[in-house]
Amino acid sequence: MKFSQTFIPTLREVPADAVIASHRLMFRSGMIRKLANGLFAYLPLGLRCFRKVEKIIREEMDAIGSLEIKPTVIVPGELWKESGRWTAMGESLLRVKNRTGAEFVVSPTAEEAFTCLVRDELNSYRQLPLSLYQINTKYRDEIRPRYGVMRGREFVMKDAYSFHSDEASLDEHYQAQGRAYRAIFKRCGLTVIPVRADSGAMGGQGSEEFMVESEIGDNTLILCRACDYAANVERAECKSDPGGPSSIAPIPPIPPIEKISTPDVKTIAELCDFLKTDPKHFIKTLIYKAEHIERDRSSAPLPDVREEFFAVAIRGDLDVNEIKLAAVLKAAQVSLAADSDVERITGAPVGFAGPVGLASVPLVMDRTVAEMKDAVAGALEKDVHFKHVSCGRDFNAWLLADVRTVKAGDRCPVCGGELYEKKGNELGHIFKLGRKYTQAMNVHYLDESGVSHIPLMGCYGIGLDRTLASIIEEHHDEAGIVWPAQVAPYQVIIVPISYRGAARECCDMLAARLEAAGVELLLDDRDERAGVKFNDADLIGIPWRIVVGEKNLAAGRVEVKRRAGGETKLLDIEAACRGEFLET
Amino acid sequence: MKFSQTFIPTLREVPADAVIASHRLMFRSGMIRKLANGLFAYLPLGLRCFRKVEKIIREEMDAIGSLEIKPTVIVPGELWKESGRWTAMGESLLRVKNRTGAEFVVSPTAEEAFTCLVRDELNSYRQLPLSLYQINTKYRDEIRPRYGVMRGREFVMKDAYSFHSDEASLDEHYQAQGRAYRAIFKRCGLTVIPVRADSGAMGGQGSEEFMVESEIGDNTLILCRACDYAANVERAECKSDPGGPSSIAPIPPIPPIEKISTPDVKTIAELCDFLKTDPKHFIKTLIYKAEHIERDRSSAPLPDVREEFFAVAIRGDLDVNEIKLAAVLKAAQVSLAADSDVERITGAPVGFAGPVGLASVPLVMDRTVAEMKDAVAGALEKDVHFKHVSCGRDFNAWLLADVRTVKAGDRCPVCGGELYEKKGNELGHIFKLGRKYTQAMNVHYLDESGVSHIPLMGCYGIGLDRTLASIIEEHHDEAGIVWPAQVAPYQVIIVPISYRGAARECCDMLAARLEAAGVELLLDDRDERAGVKFNDADLIGIPWRIVVGEKNLAAGRVEVKRRAGGETKLLDIEAACRGEFLET
């Protein structure tokens, strides 16, 4: 392809909002242009790379027997009402009403569409397992789209959905997807961190996120310095802290619980000062509002509970992880209750909530509190606290769960090593959904004995745009992109110092010979200064650059430069025509 | 690919709304399933065929130097307001408002997005011509979607847009697109009728539609029995009728215009009875309301006129073609005025409109009226008509134009032969848009001397879903689809009478050898009766069927059947493995 016959509008300037390398370089190299906030058009160069990533993903999906289909992008709102996500997805879901008043969704994912298709076709266990995927347009109404295609509103996702008659079959395909994902990212030249992740509004147990490290990542990862433990902070666990109250043994006899007056004490710090104790000996009690709580659907199909209040008790030096809490409560979302609700529920001003005697709402207790046998806590009265509070003796939990936020310095739940934090971006995600959708949407099959069952389901997504941008994040330098060969738009760029006379003939011959051998190449036939052409070649990041200049040409040679590393060497024209440099 | 490892849910039954062959067969063969009215999912078999069509289109576009890009499906409403189509497109345009109140369009075509992209990049004449295309999802809110993917709401379209500095360059690319379209349809095995077409809301002059004949076509084509004239009735022209008033020569002296009383005469037929004349001697005058009239944008950028009234005079035996009329008036739409408007404008009850003395609205006159020198017409008074009305003497037109509806039996405008009608479906459409969008959206480039110009534009679309369905319409029989090889999902289907023992080994070997040679094939390994498998093979329409049965196998042979035509022959297994039958 001749440079003048394609459309690669390279730029020296970048828009002010392009703060990350991939955004800047995709823009400067003419890969993308912005149509509106969060809406990007891929120009020919960008689309070539995009298709390379797409092809790698398609090949790996086909290799594990997932079958490609193409549902619509616009899907009936009805299906989303059946699954419950019409309300649960909140405002990031783009809803449309057409002229007849019918409601539609611009798909952000496609659990509903795939489940609906399978529901209509599934009869027998012999049809299972079944894995289907699409590579298709998605839309998520990001409130603050930024970082170019890394966090756009419209994007392309490969999403696969599998259906199974038993856990073993689901697990087998889940593992196969995991292997396919590792293969995909490897072929794309990406270093990913696979982490256990919270499955959020998707529901179900068993999931793995594929992250890339990124300063602007919207996920915090918790990693262990000693082993390969890696988790999203949304779901990370940790070991009990050595030196915490539980390690003090034997426990001395605990005095009876006792009310103490704590006037003008507003914060945990003030209270600790006042009582000369440590936040680790305080039971912090918070009132939460949980929304859209999913009930067990196995029996009667009850509607979800719209909102309900809970008290959460946790050791005073720790924070509640709201995502873990929401998961424990099977709620779409939890948030701290308003002051007026806290006052109504605790019967006291804000600041005096405690687990003892709290009867108006269920008490969720973090595991750390179970170990607290002589603690301080609010007494549900203004300016009053309890001391010598003992879990099990003075109060009990409605639900004991791990809801603490793990942070750097905590201990690895696997090996006890020190945990640290990194920012990451999610490129892919595989889930075991269980029966969340198949149950809500009433999918059944008959087993060998004619008994009806609800199939298990898994889902597996990769964002293509974000994967492409992440490749650039990992493979660039000062001068531009440094494409790994597998995803490069072209393998070779031929740059004549001047596209005239013998140099032109040589370029044309090189291009013809290499293209005939199946090498994708760009011939920079523009009437530009050599410097401009060299800069553009570096910016665009083509793996191999062949420079055709008069002096070398006179000696029957061309200069070949590898973009990654920058080594150059002189090669006989005939060897260059045979693409011998490509093998090195 | 083994049948059991893909997902081809064939059916004997069809849904009641599947009235055309392609809809029935795509559904029965498991190519598509319905998600909602007008929204279809392609299952694996359907998607394979879809991709074949896509590949053919992509190759032909690339061959003429059009460059593929990928804008978004959801585009900012702002761009559509700039072009004026936000209002002009009416209710078939799906508009969305997001959570921030921003307005978007789910693209039905993409003139705006492409024009916007080019506007931002275009500086110099050296960048022209530029032709860009996409193959992407589109949505049109059909009020009555039907006939399966033939007229769905969501569909995929290849749409190309080209930009030029002069007419010659536009015409050159327009011709190249036309040739590419002919090549595409030929490679798809389709017989298309290229017709001159009205360009409707798209604007501009010079356009060609590629139609396939279809009973359920939504277009009426006017064709000539004697030459290759073909036109959409929306735009068809014809020769003046022999024997019409114009052919009576020499014209006798015409008496002066004269009022006559015509009490109780309601219709043209009654009037003709009353006056003992023929509708051909009557000037029918109709009052039309035109909406969204485009003004000339070359000078001041005036807003479009929202609505305006016109009188249209036409020979009494003819009908006004509202699409031709709208095009002549540069209106988005025209419709007959309400009775109250007619009474206000003509100053008389409905039924007495006439061209003489009508001053309140502009008069558009069909060419047929220009020839009328002694006619009858309404006199703008209740129960009164004029006779001896003479065009040019008694009244003049504001605009003389061809606005008649051509019908079967009229004379070909090219050769005078007899015209006839056919129903057709539009698969593709190429247009010269002129400066409609580039002017409205303010696109400029500088010429050699640094003078700013607005580029010319062309647009070129093909509906992929409809093309695929049309292939089935043209290539099927009682038993099912009969795919042309180029778009067949697989080239060969291997059907064992029973997939066991030696037959199984033979099937596996055949499959392995043929697949190794690059032949796409399906091996029907299902545990079904041979009859069921034969029926499915016919239904799915794979070009070549290889039957592996015990008896032939014992003689070292398999039976090869061609789906088109149905010839069978016995072939040595080795010859079958070498795919020798494929050459025949």
Image (cartoon, coloured by chain):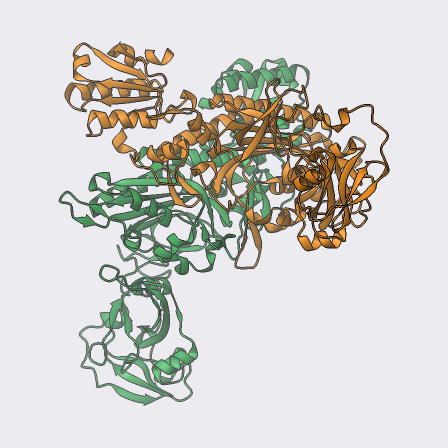
Chain colours: A green, B orange
Examine the rendering and report whether any part of residue A134 can be seen.
Answer: yes
Q: Position of residue B397 (x, y in %)?
A: 80, 39
- In the picture, measured across the screen, residue B446 lies left or right of residue A406, that is right
Is residue A558 positioned above or below B1 on the image? above
**Picture coordinates of residue A360, whole percent (x, y):** 30, 80
Of residues A573 and A107, which is closer to you in this image? A107
Dividing the image into 4 quarters, which one contains the C terminus of chain A? top left
Q: Is residue B309 left or right of residue A146?
A: right
Above or below, B264 against B27 in this view is below
Q: Is residue B406 above or below residue A179?
A: above
Say above or below: A231 vs B286: below
- Please tell me in which quadrant of the rendered image residue A187 appears: top left
Of B429 and A50, which appears nearest the observer? B429
Q: Please tell me how many numbered marks the rendered image carries.
A: 0
- Residue A512: give x, y in percent of width and height: 55, 17
Asked whether residue A522 is in view, the answer is: no
Image point (71%, 52%), residue name: B349
Residue B84 spot, x, y in % from top left: 66, 47
Residue occupying the point 27% across, 83% down:
A357
Asked whether B145 or B29 is in front, the reply is B145
Could you say which is closer to the camera, residue B45 or residue B283?
B283
- Horizontal side of B112 relative to A58 (left or right) equals right
If the image is split into quadrants, where does the N terminus of chain A sit? Answer: top right
